[in-house]
Amino acid sequence: MERPRIMVIGSDVTTVQSVSSYCLKKNLEVFPYYGLPTVEEMTLFAPHALVLCIPIPDDFQSQILQPCIFWSEQPIEKKLPLVSTSTELYIYLEKVLAA
């Protein structure tokens, strides 16, 4: 059985690296992306789920077809399913990948 592929997207290198390392600890195939990928780049990797490290532009989020988990260590005003710890990330990843 193939390992689930997760794409971690964000503009802050440190945050993307941290979140990617949490995913690697769960034996997931991880593709960290610094900045905003094109739809073609996301299609090439074919992730099962995305972890979006906030801030991410709203217009980017509207292009996404894969399930998303939003990561932010700071409180934000938007009503998003937000995680901020590795434990919360693991719980959401299990739910998303089981669907």
Image (tube, helix red, strand yellow):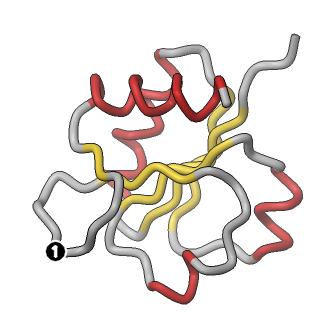
User: Is residue 2 shown above or below 93?
Assistant: above
The residue beneath circle 1 is: 77
Residue 28 horizontal/vertical position (percent): 62, 23
Closest to the observer: 57 or 27?
Answer: 57
Residue 24 horizontal/vertical position (percent): 52, 23
Quarter occupied by residue 60: bottom right
Closest to the observer: 29 or 70?
Answer: 70
Q: Residue at 41% of width from left, 44% of height from top?
A: 17
Dot 1 crowding, Cα within 10 Å, few <14, some 14–19, many 20+ = few
Q: Residue at 46% of width from left, 85% of height from top?
A: 58
Q: Is residue 99 left or right of residue 14?
A: right
SS for callout 1: loop
Q: Quadrant of the C terminus?
A: top right
Q: Is residue 48 left or right of residue 72?
A: right
> What amino acid does circle 1 point to?
Glu
Q: Is residue 10 left or right of residue 87?
A: right
